Image (tube, rainbow, N blue to C red):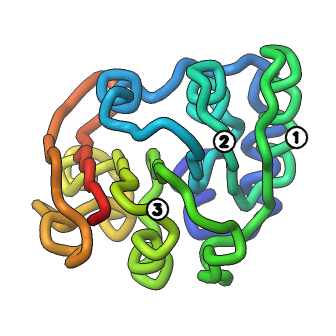
């Protein structure tokens, strides 16, 4: 199953995608690894965590991680990877396309969103879930990726799209970059 076919699709398609992958933990997102020092010590919410490559990485760094994803298969894989690494990660299945009530998950010192463009209703909820001086790190495909591939433009960030999105957050860093996987924008914000 092609990755773009599973975007904004029913849970069963995501479950099939993750079920077809070898049971091997992938490397964490390079943008996250390069910028982990921006994160505040404490609790992290990994939004649309997939099968946990970033959640497990952050847990091994000493963060208390809560991971949310739509796919029960991805979360099962994450729990296995966490167990293999002797890590404790709190997992929750939540469809971010139909449920925007992230306040049920509590407040976090950090929120990460990797390779996922939340709908506006979820995006605007994120600052409400940050503690004082909490950090929001987002890294996902940008408009160049859509132009250079058949990846749908609506799932890619527009040029500088998030720079002025969060009125209560301070932009610490914004970079556009290209690597072997495609074109990305990375943003790091801090709560007041």
Q: Position of residue 40 (x, y in %)?
A: 41, 40
Secondary structure of residue under mark 1: helix
Secondary structure of residue under mark 2: strand
Residue sitting nearer the eye, 63 or 70? 63
Residue at left offset 51%, top offset 24%: 28
- Circle 1 residues within 10 Å: few <14, some 14–19, many ≥20: some
Outermost residue to the front = 132
Mark 1 vs mark 2, foreground winner is 2
Q: Quadrant of residue 30?
A: top left
Residue at left offset 73%, top offset 44%: 17
Mark 3 vs mark 2, foreground winner is 3
Mark 1 vs mark 3, foreground winner is 3
**Circle 2 sits on which residue?**
65
Q: Quadrant of residue 191?
A: bottom left
Mark seen at residue 189: none
Q: Which corner quadrant holds the N terminus?
A: top right
**Circle 1 sits on which residue?**
76
- Circle 3 residues within 10 Å: few <14, some 14–19, many ≥20: some
Q: Is residue 144 visible?
A: yes
Which of the two labelled residues, at mark 3 and mark 2, occupies the earlier sequence position? Answer: 2
Q: Are marks 3 and 2 in contact (CB under 8 Å)?
A: no
**Circle 3 sits on which residue?**
131
Which of the two labelled residues, at mark 1 and mark 3, occupies the earlier sequence position? Answer: 1
Secondary structure of residue under mark 3: strand
Image: 104 above or below 13: below
Report how far apart the C-alphas of labels 1 and 2 lie in the structure.
15 Å
Q: Which corner quadrant holds the C terminus?
A: bottom left
Residue at left offset 71%, top offset 37%: 51
In the rendered structure, the answer to whether residue 77 lies left or right of residue 145 reads: right
């Amino acid at each position: 199953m092609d990755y773009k076919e599973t975007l904004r699709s029913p849970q069963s398609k995501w479950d099939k995608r993750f079920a077809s992958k070898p049971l091997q933990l992938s490397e964490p997102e390079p943008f996250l690894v390069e910028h982990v020092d921006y994160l505040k010590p404490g609790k992290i919410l990994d939004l649309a965590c997939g099968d946990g490559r970033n959640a497990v990485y952050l847990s091994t760094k000493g963060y208390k991680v809560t991971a949310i994803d739509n796919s029960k298969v991805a979360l099962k894989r994450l729990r296995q990877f966490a167990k293999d690494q002797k890590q404790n990660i709190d997992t929750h299945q939540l469809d971010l396309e139909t449920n925007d009530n992230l306040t049920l998950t509590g407040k976090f010192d950090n929120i990460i969103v990797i390779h996922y463009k939340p709908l506006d209703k979820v995006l605007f909820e994120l600052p409400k879930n940050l503690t004082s001086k909490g950090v929001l790190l987002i890294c996902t495909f940008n408009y160049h990726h859509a132009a250079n591939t058949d990846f749908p433009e609506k799932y890619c960030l527009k040029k500088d799209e998030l720079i002025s999105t969060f009125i209560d957050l301070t932009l610490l860093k914004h970079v556009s970059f290209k690597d072997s996987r495609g074109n990305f924008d990375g943003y790091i914000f801090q709560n007041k």
